[in-house]
Amino acid sequence: MTDETTGVTLLIDEASAADAAPETELAAARAAHSLAQQLEALLIVADEPLSAMTLATACDRPVREVRKELQTLIADYNGETTGVPPRGFELREVAGGYRFYVRESLDPVVADFVQQQSPAKLSQAALETLAVIAYRQPVSRGAIASIRAVNVDSVVRTLLARGLVAEVGHDGETGAILYGTSEQLLGHLGIGDISELPSVAPLLDDGSEGFDHESL
């Protein structure tokens, strides 16, 4: 075997080992943690409801087993099986998927905290995203990102935390969360309904793409 052939063989072996390493780490992580722990880890980073099928694929478990474990988690968080008061969060099944939410009874506590911690001014990105939501509502996060041509995940979370927008429903086809303006925002603007928003058409020159002129 020539030196050149030996070198190529070594490179192939190294590449194969590198490809196998992540798979080995994944298998080890799955083996070291219960299904409940894996589901919690996935759900806590999700911005949209995750279906049982998606979770089952991520955990490499049967869908039926995942559904059963999700129901157990819901009961545990609600204090139905642990003998302790409900947790400050809950796991809800919405739009064909599962997602963590703050328990509704704690909304006033969270709202007060957010108002005290949040800066007085919104960034330009937040203002632009808020405008898209106001004039296109109800609108999904994906549609907002398409209009602004940037990722809007963190900005939408900021607007939700500030109480300026709210989840108003789910898309009937995709299950994506739809966003709209909140009563708090209308109060800040001094209007009673979104129909009182000023027409955006006079403010646009050639930057009107993405807006429905029939509603302007």
Image (cartoon, rainbow, N blue to C red):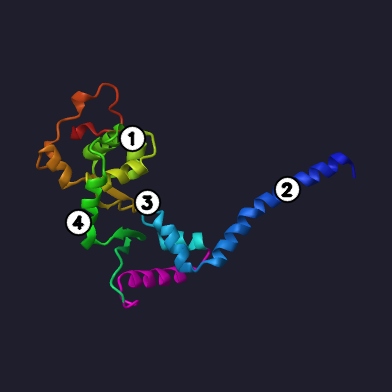
Marks 1,2: beta carbons within 8 A:
no
The residue shown at (80%, 46%) is 9
Which residue lies under the disc numbered 3? 47
Q: Which callout, 3 or 4, points at the residue further toward the start of the chain?
A: 3
Marks 4,2: beta carbons within 8 A:
no
Q: Quadrant of the N terminus?
A: top right
- Quote the CA–CA distance across marks 3 and 4: 22 Å
Q: Which mark is residue 14?
A: 2
Examine the residues drawn in magenta and state their main secondary structure: helix
Which residue lies under the disc numbered 1? 147
Q: Which callout, 1 or 3, points at the residue further toward the start of the chain?
A: 3
Q: Which mark is residue 80?
A: none
Q: Which mark is residue 108?
A: 4
Magenta stretch in the rendered image: 60-83
Kind of element beneath mark 4: helix
Where is residue 62 shown, x and y percent of the image? 50, 68
Q: Which callout, 1 or 2, points at the residue further toward the start of the chain?
A: 2
On the image, which quarter does residue 73 sit in?
bottom left
Q: Quadrant of the C terminus?
A: top left
Where is residue 192 shown, x and y percent of the image? 9, 42
Kind of element beneath mark 2: helix
- Mark 1: amino acid: Ile
- Residue 63 in view (yes/no): no
Instruction: Sort mark 4 into few (<14), some (14-19) or many (20+) by Cα contacts within 10 Å.
Output: few
